[in-house]
Amino acid sequence: MNRSEKYRGRLAPSPTGFLHVGHARTFWVAQERARAQGGALILRNEDLDSTRYKMEFVDAMIEDLRWFGFAWSEGPDVGGPFAPYNQSGRMDGYRAALNKLRAGDFIYPCTCSRKDIQAATRAPHANDDGEPIYPGTCRQKRQSEIGDQKFSWRFRVPDGETISFVDGNFGEQRFVAGRDFGDFIVWRGDDVPAYQLACVADDEAMRITEVVRGADLLISTARQILLYRALGLAPPDFFHCALMLDESGQRLAKRHDALSLRQLRQQGRTPHSLR
Ligand SMILES: [Zn+2]
């Protein structure tokens, strides 16, 4: 990050369910960090996953965030200089990034299904974020060989290279490409940008200077650093928050409905007590 830039942070929820107390905690850290720097906080609605996306959740999400005490100066409900703030409205930017990656030969078309990948991975070894290491089946494929088969675009990682970055919370992080994570999808077979690409394109376009998010995305940060590099962009700073665990040591996830902000609110909990 260029230190003369004004701090710009973001909240980037997906409207695939009701907001969870775990998300709220991470978002709260994001808001506190933006406030401490006298910076701006942006709300970005990550609604690309159209199969799981429900309109009712967007309104609920915004309402729950406001109820909890979040305030943003740019977002889908208030607009701003980098509108639209719904990812579904930002396809042109994602396509431009995809074309740049294609032009630089950083990506290749992959026709593998999830099943193919599992079958080709002899020792099924998933990394920390549960994503199996791609066995490289399609690495040499060209688009002209694909015909009318359905395919995704996959990023070729530099095998053996250590990707390191200094996290604002956890300090120095090191991940080895090809070992800790493999070639990853940047554009899905259903013609939707993958999380990694959309996130990088938007954080760049919205001039985000620090990304605050959950520690489950540490490996994704290594992937995204490779995307920034391939696109000729400087990555923002990163601050990852420890994940909340329940009594049995399981990660809190959206399926723990009892811990949705909505439910807690209905039970009479106040934002103050939750914070
Ligand atoms: Zn493949």
Image: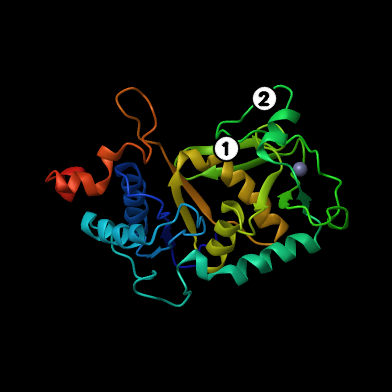
User: Which is more foreground, mark 2 or mark 1?
Assistant: 2
**Label 2: few (<14), some or many (≥20) within 10 Å?**
few
| Quadrant in which the N terminus is drawn | bottom right
Classify the position of ligand 1 by quadrant: top left, top right, bottom left or bottom right.
top right
- Mark 1 residue type: Gln
Residue at point 17%, 48% (across, down):
265
* Local secondary structure at mark 2: loop
Q: Where is residue 122? Give x, y as percent.
A: 74, 23
Give x and y (percent) for residue 241: 41, 41
- Judging depth in this view, the residue of 182 and 9 nearest the camera is 182
Quarter of the picture holding the C terminus = top left
Q: Residue at x 71, y 42 (%)?
A: 183
Q: Is residue 47 left or right of residue 17?
A: right
Residue 145 vs 205, above or below: the answer is: above
Residue 143 placement, left or right of 68: right
Q: Disc 2 marks which residue? A: 124
Q: Which residue is mark 1?
A: 173
Residue 39's disc number:
none
Q: Is residue 102 or residue 11 the one in the foreground?
A: 102
Tell me where residue 160 sits by quadrant.
top right
Crowding near the residue tagged with mark 1, few <14, some 14–19, many ≥20 C-alpha atoms within 10 Å: some
Secondary structure of the residue carrying numbered label 1:
strand
What amino acid type should be assigned to the residue bearing mark 2? Pro
Residue 135 spot, x, y in % from top left? 76, 34
The coloring applied to the image is rainbow
From the viewer's perspective, is 126 left or right of 11? Answer: right
First in sequence, mark 2 or 1: give its number. 2
Q: Position of residue 85 (x, y in %)?
A: 45, 69
Image height check: is 161 above or below 210?
above
Viewer-side residue, 124 vs 114:
114
